[in-house]
Image (cartoon, coloured by chain):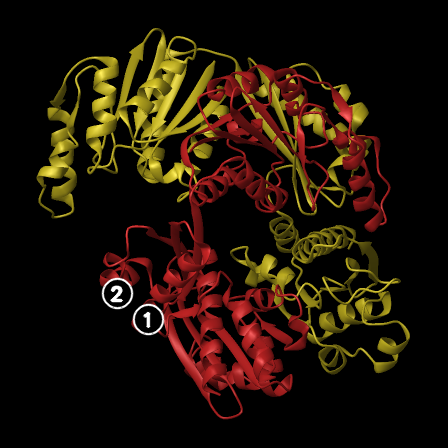
Chain colours: A yellow, B red
Amino acid sequence: MNAAIITIGDEILIGQIVDTNSAWIASQLALAGYNIIEIRSVSDSQNHIHSALKAFEGNTDLVVLTGGLGPTRDDTTRGALASYFGGTLKENPEVLHHIYTLFAARGMKISETNRLQAVVPDSCEILKNRSGTAPGMLFRKSGTIFVSLPGVPYELKDIFTEELIPKLADIFHGPLIVHRTVMTQGIPESYLAAKIQDWELSLPPNVKLAYLPRPGIVRLRLTASGKDRNSLAAELAQLIDKLLKIIPDEVFATEDIGLEARCGQLLLDHHKTVATAESCTGGSISSAITSVPGSSAYYKGSVIAYDNSVKVKELGVTPEMLNNSGAVSREVAEQMANAVRIKMDTDFGVAVTGVAGPGGGSEAKPVGYTWIAVASAKNCTSRNFLFGEHRGRNVEKSVQAALNMLRIKILEY
Amino acid sequence: MNAAIITIGDEILIGQIVDTNSAWIASQLALAGYNIIEIRSVSDSQNHIHSALKAFEGNTDLVVLTGGLGPTRDDTTRGALASYFGGTLKENPEVLHHIYTLFAARGMKISETNRLQAVVPDSCEILKNRSGTAPGMLFRKSGTIFVSLPGVPYELKDIFTEELIPKLADIFHGPLIVHRTVMTQGIPESYLAAKIQDWELSLPPNVKLAYLPRPGIVRLRLTASGKDRNSLAAELAQLIDKLLKIIPDEVFATEDIGLEARCGQLLLDHHKTVATAESCTGGSISSAITSVPGSSAYYKGSVIAYDNSVKVKELGVTPEMLNNSGAVSREVAEQMANAVRIKMDTDFGVAVTGVAGPGGGSEAKPVGYTWIAVASAKNCTSRNFLFGEHRGRNVEKSVQAALNMLRIKILEY
């Protein structure tokens, strides 16, 4: 089944707000088995709304419209819908009763503007809005179902989940779509593609693969279409098992979560704790780890040793090490990781030292040159990386690489 | 002039990623004087791409396409563009040379997949991608300019700003537009609007004001249109002078820079240094400060004392303070700020302790309750804040408030 999404509102067209509603609706429709062919944002004018409706009428199974239903601008969208689908704007007694109940529960009086929310085209079926005043509206024309929902996110989500999805299940009976996401770290998109080429070429025709890169991370999204949820899930699980044999170290999760959350899960599962010592990443590893709610259960703290004097005074790096090996070296990274682990009394210590740029590079150690070490009571693993020229991305790639090394160390422990 | 935006990629249509590129492009086009008539997201298929192009050809001045240009096989944009605009796909020697240079600088070898990025329709003009491999492409058809840009945000922004905007200024000849940005901290958008209402109402008709809020910060963007760059610049400078008299403490910069950069300028100018001690912000202040190139000249480091044991052992917080005042208190914040300043031998020490949430709140100290202290050799200033319920935004607001307190302390010193 095909679906399209139309968002209405000038604030999206001038870039003043990011359209997050569309992404949410799209993800929910995809889960419900719809193939979304287009998302379109148009301005709050009758002409633009009408031509968007026209574009999908008769060739699309479902069109979800959102926005343009607030109490100050109901004239445009509601009027545009009434003139497009026919019928007249009338006060709907059921909706009016709901608005009265809602205001009474809050101890508030209903205003004329609020009362206007009950005025809807009499050609629509009402979708009840439990958490707000503007109802959802469902229209049918030329074999296409059109649904208009308010743009307030929690109202939209409530109507969509509680009212629309059950109604659509009654109306349509189509192919089912199932997604799985595999998270990889430490291998650029083009290298990854080369490494898993045979596996990708052998994918069955009902399964599609997409590469979704971020600095240091590539997400692989598998989409399977078919008739039975269980057999599709089993098919994807089997394909992911095969993939894991090809890139076992690079895959850090088979669900859509970040490395900081994955490390958090593992530390909790294994009852272990961690501390960090950061130079070039300047607190970004710590910041990533503590972005996870509940991280205080396994994260104790960090020494940000941006200046060499702090490396010496707080982390036992010696002036000799700095002279002989340099601040960006295996020796210093390992010393930092071991020292912070002991200082903060944790199971693991993670340390990074590198040349973030744009200054500070040399021929032997150019911008992007980085050492990362992860220490436990048993041993210390360190690795050398050469990232790129961009300061911010070097930091982000260092964070991801360090967290992946921590993840592997926890699993080995 | 009219413009439309087309984003290409299944990941937007299934809601796996939120389309932030469109909002950015829309805001930039609006600034450049374009009226955006539509934003459309279509799937990575030749048919859908072609019908979107067709919809705007001949009736729109400018169409910006983004996405669908990655090196892997889910991207079909390039072929779709070649077949729509004519010409053949050929390896462009200039682009290939650029890709080689980019990879050589990272000490990496170019793969067959990377090399494919240099294959573009010979009917396009190339827009150079300084920070990535996929170039921008400009096509002309039926009086419409079509521009295709990669979907990676930093590459997109770089090509858009450095290559496309100057090119469009050559092609079209609209009125001259000059922007200035005023940065404010610590005053919510609605309060700010009330405070500067008279000033805003007195703006001349050729000057527009936009409020651009982020957690803890509101940017005020002034856009003037006219014929002469110097007189527009003078007009804006005069208006900003008037504004500074109304909100002197809230404005931290009259150019579009962050507080971390502003503090960096001031520390360099005054030859001063700073260290931080962070609890609930978990390294985010340090991470912000060190995001500025050259920050090693004034930033020494941080103790991230996420666990109370680290506050005691490393920052001289006593068990009595924790018992009597609690970890989130003026006493502990000031102790942390003073201790880290002495420990790292700096002019200023900045400390934050708070309840980031979602857990850990109490009736007396709910989620969002935060103490921030800034210490110098002379004195220590501390302030109490009650931010909101959202963990990520509480951290971000704490970072901005702490940096603004540091800025004021440097100016007072």
Relative to the observer, which residue lies in front, B63 or B342?
Answer: B63
Q: Splitting the image into 4 quarters, where does residue B165 fall?
A: top right
Percent across and percent down for residue A153 are 35, 39
Image quarter hosting the N terminus of chain B: top left
The subunit letter for the residue under badge 1 reads B
Left or right side of B206 for A27? right
Labelled disc at residue B210 = none
Relative to the observer, which residue lies in front, B180 or A133?
Answer: B180
Q: Residues within 10 Å of mark 2 (few under 14, many from 20)?
A: some
Q: CA distance from mark 1 to mark 2?
A: 8 Å
| Callout 2 amino acid | Lys
> From where the camera sits, is residue B321 visible?
yes
The residue carrying mark 2 is B195
* Tags 1 and 2 touching, CB below 8 Å: yes
Answer above or below: position of A342 versus A402. Answer: below
Please tell me if label 1 and label 2 are on a single chain.
yes
Percent across and percent down for residue B211 are 36, 54
Determine whether the residue tagged by mark 2 lies in a helix, strand or loop. helix
Answer above or below: position of A299 versus A149. Answer: below
Q: Tell me which residue sits at (27%, 62%) in the image.
A: B191
Q: Tell me which residue sits at (64%, 71%) in the image.
A: B295
Which residue reaches farthest bottom?
B378
Determine whether the residue tagged by mark 1 lies in a helix, strand or loop. loop
> From where the camera sits, is residue A344 visible?
no
| Callout 1 amino acid | Ile
Left or right side of A325 for B175? left
Q: Splitting the image into 4 quarters, where does residue B202 fall?
A: bottom left
Answer above or below: position of B136 versus A392. Answer: above
Relative to the observer, which residue lies in front, B43 or B62?
Answer: B62
Percent across and percent down for residue B64 are 53, 32
Percent across and percent down for residue B108 are 85, 45
The residue carrying mark 1 is B247
